[in-house]
Amino acid sequence: MVFKINIGEKSGKTWKIESQPEILVGKSLGDTIKGSEVSNNLEGYELKISGASDFAGFPHKEDVEGQELRRVLLTKGWGMKAKKKGLRLRKTVRGKRLSEKTVQVNLSLLKEGEKTLIEIFPDQNKLPETNKVTNPKDLKVKEETKEELKSNEPEPEKPEPEPSEPEPEKPEPEPSEPEPEKPEPEPEKPEPEPENNKQ
C-alpha cells in the first residue's frame, strides 16, 4: 500500500505526493524527517510529521502511545467539536506511531531546499480554470419545453387514403300530397230528461 503524503506550507498551500510505506513506518507524530527520505526531489528539505490517519479514517493522536486503536475520553479541542460546556465524549483514535495500516500522512515544512516546491511540482501549481461568464442570463440557455420537443420530432408519415368509388346519390324524397282535413265532430246534443208521470 502507498502512503498519501500532504506537505503543508505556512501560506496554506498543500502539495500532494505518494511514497512507499517502508520509509515512514515506525516513525511517530512530531518526528522530524529529511525530505530525501520521502522523495528524491525533496533533497535539502526538512519536514515534521504533524498528523496521520488510517485506512478507516481514524486519526493518530500524539499523546496516545503505540499504533493500535484506543477509545479515549476527549473534551473540546483536538478531534472533537463540543457544543455544550463541559461535554466529554469517548472517541476511537490510533496511537502516535505510524504503521502499515496508516494511509495518509500530513507533513509540515520546516526548512526549504534548493528548489522551491513550485518548481518540483509544476502540475499542482496550475490555477483551476474558471468560467468567465458569471451572470447566468449571459448564457442565454433556452430550456426546451415538452411542446417544443414534440414539434422538433419528425411527424410519422400518414398513409395516403386509397381512392374509393363515389357513392351513388340518394334520390330526394318526392313531396307527398297534403292529407285532407278531417271535419270536426259536431258537439253532442244533451238528451231530454224524461218527464215524471203525475199521479
Image (tube, grey):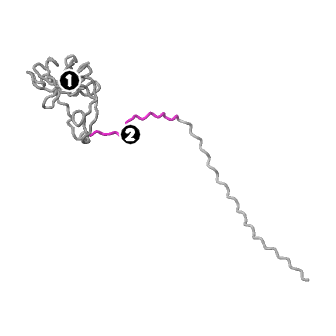
Q: Position of residue 28 (x, y in %)?
A: 19, 23
Q: How many marks?
A: 2
Which-is-in-front pick, marks 2 and 1?
A: 1
Left or right, residue 172 beside residue 191: left
- Residue 105, visible in the rendered structure: yes
What quarter of the picture does the N terminus occupy? top left
**Residue pictured at 26% horizontal, 33% vertical:** 73
- Between residues 47 and 6, which one lies in front from this camera angle? 47
* Residue type, mark 1 in image: Ile
Which kind of residue does numbered mark 2 sit on?
A: Lys
Secondary structure at numbered mark 2: helix
Look at 20% across and 34% down and name the residue there: 130
Q: Can residue 159 be found in the magenta stretch? A: yes
Q: Report the front residue among 116 and 135.
A: 116
Query: Which span is picked out in magenta?
Result: 140-162
Q: Main secondary structure of the magenta part?
A: loop
Which labelled disc corresponds to residue 146? 2
Are the residues flagged by discs 2 and 1 in contact, CB closer than 8 Å?
no
| Category of crowding for the residue at label 2, using alpha-carbon neighbours closer than 10 angstroms: few (below 14), some (14–19), many (at least 20) | few
Is 161 included in the stretch rendered in magenta? yes
Q: Splitting the image into 4 quarters, where does residue 111 fall?
A: top left
Residue placed under numbered mark 1 in the picture: 5
> Residue at point 67% right, 56% down?
177
Q: Does label 2 or label 1 sit earlier along the sequence?
A: 1
Q: Is residue 85 above or below residue 70?
A: below
Mark 1 closeness class: few <14, some 14–19, many ≥20 residues within 10 Å: many
Where in the figure is residue 137, as x and y percent of width and height?
A: 25, 42
